[in-house]
Image (cartoon, rainbow, N blue to C red):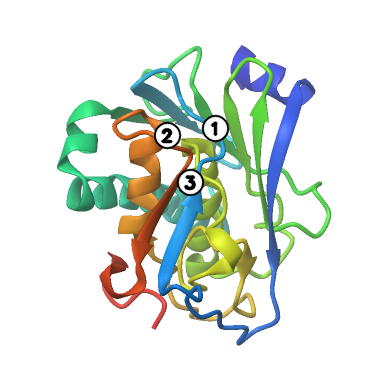
Amino acid sequence: MSSVSRRAVFSFAVAFLLAVAVPGDVQGTHSDGSYDIPVWFKWNKRVLDVLIIPPNRGTLTSLEEDYMAAIWDSVTQWQNAINKYSPALANAVRINLYVLGQGTTPTDPEIVITADASKGTMLGVAVRVTDGKCVVDNSRLFVTPLSYRDMYNVNGQEYGHCLGLDHVGGDHPSRDIMNGNYPYAVGGQNPFQCISNLDVRGLEKVFGLTSGTSASISASSYQGIPAGCGN
């Protein structure tokens, strides 16, 4: 593990947690027919290095292979959403993705994604550390029978926090990747949560393309990827 990652373990500042909600707990829109997402923090840079740390350095088990695929797919899906919903943001911000042990890796990454089965009942944790970096700890993925889709959804949200986003307001809509309560029983072929145009609007504020500390969108305009997410 890099020196930055080691420092992160000992310098926690504030964290976001993802818990399991009661299955079938579907939220509607706000009373005014809109959705919103607050900004958690803002980056003062527009180039981010993201380092994924595999579960071990040897041959991966089938579960660990699913984990690595889910991590990679959920992170790259965020970039797909940025490209789709905000070409201006895609042009302004560059996110470099690395895997430890595969080629050259950064010595001082802004975001580190790892797994540590020691965080109690939380599915995942996003921790912003005192030097401004952010760590995703997918803490239950190897001690809870999560499927590939569960891993995708959990990491997708924690990575969204490290990009700078809070939970969607009032857990509306339940299908959004940034919904703070996981609305499914883990272990099955659950729907993919949506990385949405609402989330990308929030990132425009995180990186300073638009002003303010919260983004909103009408429920009728809400869109997300992948196709069929949340259905």
Front in this rendered view, residue 163 or 154: 163
Is residue 39 placed above or below 141 in the rendered structure? above
Residue 212: percent from left, percent from top: 43, 37
Q: CA distance from mark 1 to mark 2?
A: 7 Å
The residue shown at (69%, 74%) is: 21
Is residue 5 placed above or below 213 in the rendered structure? above
Task: Report whether 54 appears left or right of 13.
Answer: left
Location of the N terminus by quadrant is: top right
Location of the C terminus by quadrant is: bottom left
Three-letter amino acid code at disc 2?
Val
Residue 184: percent from left, percent from top: 60, 78
Q: Which residue corresponds to mark 2?
A: 206
* CB atoms of marks 1 and 2 within 8 Å: yes
Residue 9: percent from left, percent from top: 74, 26
Q: CA distance from mark 2 to mark 3?
A: 11 Å
Front in this rendered view, residue 62 or 105: 105
Is residue 7 placed above or below 146 in the rendered structure? above
Mark 1 neighbour class, 10 Å CA radius: few under 14, some 14 to 19, many 20 or more? some
Q: CA distance from mark 1 to mark 3?
A: 11 Å
Which corner quadrant of the image does residue 132 belong to? top right
Three-letter amino acid code at disc 1?
Phe
Which residue is farthest front? 32
Q: Which residue corresponds to mark 1?
A: 41
Q: Which residue corresponds to mark 3?
A: 160
The residue shown at (70%, 17%) is: 7
Q: Earlier in the sequence, mark 2 or mark 3?
A: 3
Q: Earlier in the sequence, mark 1 or mark 3?
A: 1
Q: Which label sits in the foreground, 1 or 3?
A: 1
Determine whether the residue tagged by mark 2 lies in a helix, strand or loop: helix
Front in this rendered view, residue 115 or 176: 176
